[in-house]
Image (tube, rainbow, N blue to C red):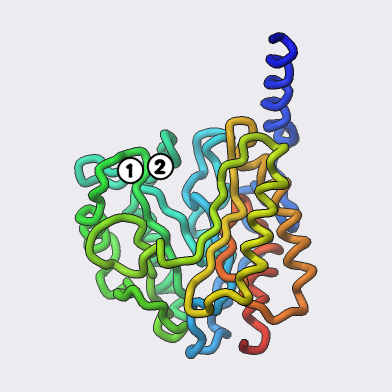
Amino acid sequence: MKKMQLIIHLIALSGIIGFSQGAIQRPDYDDTPNPEFLNPSWMASIPDQRPLSHVTMPGTHNTMALYGGVYAECESWSLASQLRAGVRFLDIRVRHVQGNLTIHHGVSYQRAHFGQVLEGVVDFLQERPSETVLMRLKEEFSETRDIYGAVVDYIHRYAHWDLLWHSRLVPTMGEARGKLIILQDFSGPDLGMRYASLDIADDWKVPTLSNVADKWKSVYEHLEEAPTGNMAQVFLTYSSGAGVFAHPRAVALRINPMLYDYLEAKSDLNQRLGIICMDFPAAPIIQMIIDFQLRSPF
């Protein structure tokens, strides 16, 4: 029994090793407050006729999860910094209480509400009309299963109806410019595309750091499927993961360099990889993802 308790203690300790030295900024991983460099208008060079399902783009998992300790924090950059760094897929989780939509990661309140997220996207798209933003939106830490009305109310209060792409169909880049595309992960009439319509790999459960290899296998296999998968369907691969003995930073510190090496090995290929959604990405790995569709068309 004592031996088992010691093993559990060591596993838990391994999940936090590496954070006492302060923030880290590497080519693949960054938990400092600001990106190393910015890439705010990279979509401007994508041809208008290219379907969005053909575009390879960087995203962030639990985009607004900046607070709550190592088990809750998934990013270190503000929303504005993420967008200016080149992130174009946002993963937004809202808690619904009496019509209010606050941002949560599990029990951890993220010091923001959905209106502030919308205002941030509006400000960015008005400044950079060549771009588009995709936003997965789902309910978190509440079980009303009825957030549609509140979401519509917030859109009218903090954005405007014409900002949205109002179709389940995948737009072309020209149709998507200046638009927020909601990937609707809740019930109700259509506000945009349905999240479930994407081809998604989100094997987020990483119980301990010894399971990182299994997580990478899931990421690798889905990225390998993307170039030959249904080109009319958006591919979405989450490289993020967490568990009781493997918090998001610990997993990202190990997965992100493998992802970086994988992308670097393919840097001379003309392939669609879809949305790559990360915890604590760095500006160089974001740039590497962006560069995939700045080559010649498919």
Q: Which residue is mark 1?
A: 95
Label 2's element? Answer: strand
Q: Which mark is residue 277?
A: none
Q: Which residue: 57% across, 85% down?
A: 45
Task: Describe residue 26's horizontal placement relative to residue 132 as left or right.
Answer: right
Quarter-wise, where is residue 244 in the image?
A: top right
Amino acid type, residue under disc 1 in the picture: Arg
Q: Is residue 158 above or below residue 19?
A: below
- Circles 2 and 1, Cβ within 8 Å, touching? The answer is yes
Q: Is residue 179 above or below residue 239?
A: below
Percent position of residue 156, x then y: 22, 63
Amino acid type, residue under disc 2 in the picture: His
Percent position of residue 30, x then y: 67, 51
Q: Nearer the viewer, residue 81 or 296?
A: 296
Q: Which residue is mark 2?
A: 104
Residue neighbourhood size for the residue with mark 1, other residues' Cα within 10 Å, grouped as few (<14), some (14–19), many (≥20):
many
